[in-house]
Image (cartoon, rainbow, N blue to C red):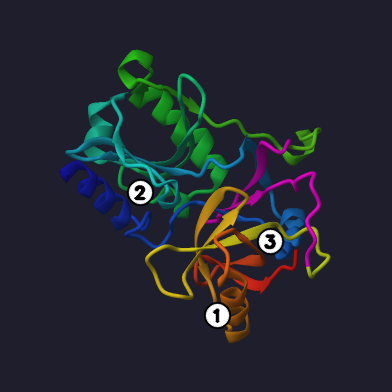
Amino acid sequence: MEWVAAAEEFIGKHGWGARGHNLGISRMFGTNDKATLVRSNMAVALRPRGLLSGFLAVVPGSGVVYIPPIAAKVPPQRIRLRISDTLRTDGAIFSAYFTRDTPRRLVLEDVLVWRGEAVWKSKPFSERWNNVMAEFVEKHFRSDDMLQECVVCLASYLTPQTIIDEPSEKTVLEFIPEAAGSKRLIWMPPRNTVSATSTSDSSVPAYNIRKEAGMGPDVYAIYNDSTRLGLALVRTLAVSKALRLATSNTNTPVNVRAEYNKGFDKYEVLEVVSV
């Protein structure tokens, strides 16, 4: 479909999606990020667990297209929005996600590219949100639920001091750095059930590995509970042997300890966890 190709090319040209350098604006919270929370000025969002962000692209000459995250395994779709002719000509890219509500809600959470400018890289979050997103809502968009076939809304942001209650098992905390070009940090609260591990660091989220069908022996998909996070990174012979042994006679998920590797933009398996 030409409109899908046009949207993916437009997003990729600006460095996003499967054709760009960044698959999304967030990454999982790691143990090394604790100091960042103390030093940095951040906003916070509570969002549903298991919902990954995609891209809402206003593609010049091709209309408005939602490109879902790769892990979602759902097709792109055209979105009918009442937006200004100016924006249709100049284009824009938003980070956004669909909820599972009825009717569905399309939640806009950030502006990545605005009328040709890569604002995610050039402007701090508060300016993108309070100025650029406000300009979109006030001057370039008019809500029409019937036309849209979904409810378009904005994400809600708080300060860390206003978070009183612990997030439930159905939600995650997302920390949004103020600095331009900084990825968000997603923290998942631990489940109530206790899983035995070969390490006692409960601050590291538990992941599980499953063989990726139709691919090589060292190719695995990594999950956080039932949420697929992409293909896992396996870099050592010891981990490779442990994974082959653990998955040789079973089709069930294998628990592992993993951490996000920024250089490879993947979750690296550090060890197989005993159960």
Residue 18 image position (x, y, % from top left):
35, 57
The amino acid on which the numbered mark 3 sits, given as a three-letter code, is Gly
Mark 1 lies on residue: 235
Position of 264 with respect to 116 (left or right) is right
Mark 3 lies on residue: 30
* Magenta stretch bounds: 168-197
The residue lying furthest to the front in this view is 249
Residue at 55%, 45% (x, y): give it. Answer: 125
The amino acid on which the numbered mark 1 sits, given as a three-letter code, is Arg
Upstream in sequence: badge 2 or badge 1: 2
Can you tell which quarter of the image residue 17 is in? bottom left
Q: Nearer the viewer, mark 2 or mark 1?
A: 1
Mark 2 lies on residue: 117
The residue lying furthest to the bottom in this view is 237
Q: Is residue 253 magenta?
A: no
Upstream in sequence: badge 1 or badge 3: 3
Position of 214 with respect to 206 (left or right) is left
